[in-house]
Image (tube, coloured by chain):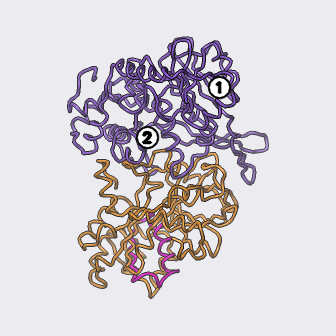
Chain colours: A purple, B orange
Amino acid sequence: MALLLRKERLDDFLQSLDGQLAAPVRLEHGEVHFAINPPVEQILQDSDYVNSTISPVALLFPQTEVLFKFKLNGKPQIELPKEPKPLIIFGIRSCDVAAMRYLEMFFSRKFIDTPFVERAEKTTLISVACQRPGRNCFCPCCAGGPFLEEGHDLQLVDFGDAFLVEVGSEKGMRLIYARGQFFEPAPYELNEQRNKLAEETLQKFEIASHMGTGVRKLTSRAVSDELWRMMAARCIECGGCAFVCPLCTCFDVVDHSLPCSSNGVICGWRERCWDCCQFAGYSMEAAGVNPRPDKVSRFKRRFYHKLSYFYMEMDGRVGCVGCGRCIQVCFGVVDMPAVVNTLREEKLLGARLR
Amino acid sequence: MEQGLGEFGERRAIVLAYVNCMWGECGMASQEFFQPLWNGRNLYEPVLARIVEVADETPDVKTFTLELDGGAIDYLPGQFAEVSVFGVGEAPFGISSSPTWTKRTGYIQVTVRAIGRVTNALHRLKVGDYVGVRAPLGNGFPVEHAEGKRVIIVGGGIGLPPLRSLLNYMLDNRERFGKITVLYGARTPADRVYKGELEEWERREDLEYLDTVDIADEEWQRLGKRVGVVTTLFPILDEQSPIDPPNTVAFVCGPPIMIHFVIIELEKRNVPDENIISTLERHMKCGVGKCGHCAIGHKYVCTDGPVFSWAEMKELEWMCAEPAV
């Protein structure tokens, strides 16, 4: 089913939504950020931005989050965080939708990660298909876009004065049913035009990352230790790639406590915060043993996780959606496409590795 | 799976399904069996547990007996618990009591060496204090795999606690297992844990027990007991009760270097790789396969392990191109 949403009705549509609305806005220095309940006039439209600096999946898996609070006064008392409110993310890009679906799978696999899954259940994604890929984008190589065929709740395709609305889930369907007044049926030709647009967009990408070759070379152990060493030597272990990667899920757990009254009662909280496998202390054990003591093994670890066939088999996708954020942050030019193409060429490709 | 659940009921079935997965017989047991087995609403919310007894094992090792809010839990030998000291943090420990003992008393035990922040804080706690517990976690030892076979348990130093859980479980179900041999090595006589129980095991008729220390003290020398690393016990074993390789299952737990050399000894005696069972140690922060710290290749030590057969370990090392042990 395809519907049309006129652009002059978009503001009204957004205001009619229940719960919190997260939407892209431009900050002072030009970067794009997903803000909660921003003024409607500040919300960016499709052509205004490529993507946000930090992926909106951080709204569901934030950099730090309190797991529970406790009070120590005799028998400890534990207080869990409140249940999350419904959230609608408008303007999320295709790559981040693909990332969100991966995270939902990951966080509900085997054990259900309560904080994430409770939020994900109450979140609706209204994505906007990309027609102007950025210079770092390579989502077509990783099944991450630019147009989505599955995974979205609603997908909007920009047609100048109106959006073509595609429904991808029951959640999206319910959203539309309750707000029929904003939509009109889309003419049949629009579907054809949409497919043509998707084809045209594919021609606009500047980067190719040959993921399949990367996966094959890495899993069959065709990569020499020397090449791993040369690539790892370029990594400065800043952790930037993991922090901007929408598929990176590692976290650390930390307790904090302080006296909260004069009679010796201790109050505290346990929180989790993002961690990165490139950090030297990441897998350090209490007894002082470090299973990955050198940078090469940690560097290998990162790309084995993203590209190993055995992970792909388990996760159902390669560990990258092609959002290109790691290209933006990596000082050493050992981001995902750079590494994949190095694996493919079997030699380090100069200063700009691509 | 429906048969033989006995007193453990449904939750037991869940755990067994998981263990069978290890041996490639994973059926349609699917995802449901991984729901939190403790009664916290949240995956990361620990259950409160009162310390009812603290026993000094060695100068830096204590055994804590815990009474869980909401009653005893059921588990398998080799599964672990995440124990929280509120305000300090959480750390994983192999459950050192046996499921059969827990069923009798309602308590669980963990044996802890003071080595880091959480363990030192734990050592400062006293009887009556509260900790948080999330348990049982991990896969546990494949006890079914050892049924009817000769069992060799090799422990080194602080590696004994999970094996003690296994041994006591086997002794409580003695008729299901063949001859049981325990080999225990420690650095010094004082570093041996569960000294009272060791003496009892030595006296038992249905159990072969051999021990050794790296460095003897006067008392040890006076008694004329064995000195040397744990692998020096294998020649003695060859003489008094030789290993029949295909019908032998070995459980090995201890420092990585010890595991390495014990596996060499077992391989020399042709014990099949599938029958050499050991545990991998990693920094398991969340215990539920989410935080990523314990991952080796595509396996998470906390949910796919911590118990692995030597065959699985070798395969894993190849897959991720890094040493597991």
Is residue A304 shown left or right of residue A178?
A: left
| Mark linked to residue A190 | none
* Total tally of numbered discs in the picture: 2
Q: Secondary structure at mark 1?
A: strand
Identify the residue at image location x=60%, y=59%. Answer: B37
Work out which quarter of the rendered image holds the N terminus of chain A and state it: top right
Nearer to the camera, A264 or B85? B85
Q: Nearer the viewer, mark 1 or mark 2?
A: 1
In the rendered structure, which disc, 1 or 2, sits on the residue that comes first in sequence?
Answer: 1
| Residue A173 picture location, percent across and down | 61, 34
| Residue A98 picture location, percent across and down | 47, 34
Q: Which residues are magenta?
A: B157-186
Is residue A197 shown left or right of residue A65?
A: left
**In the picture shown, does residue A324 fall above or below B312?**
above
The answer to whether any part of residue B59 appears in the image is no
| Mark linked to residue A21 | 1
| Mark linked to residue A281 | 2
**Majority secondary structure of magenta residues:** helix
| Residue A162 picture location, percent across and down | 56, 15
The answer to whether any part of residue B4 appears in the image is yes
Which amino acid type is marked by label 2? Gly
Q: Chain of mark 1?
A: A
Q: Is residue B167 magenta?
A: yes
Identify the residue at image location x=65%, y=19%. Answer: A38
What's the distance in space between the residues labelled 1 and 2, CA to CA? 38 Å
Quadrant of the image occupied by residue A328: top left
| Residue A95 picture location, percent across and down | 46, 29
**In the picture shown, does residue A349 fall above or below B246?**
above
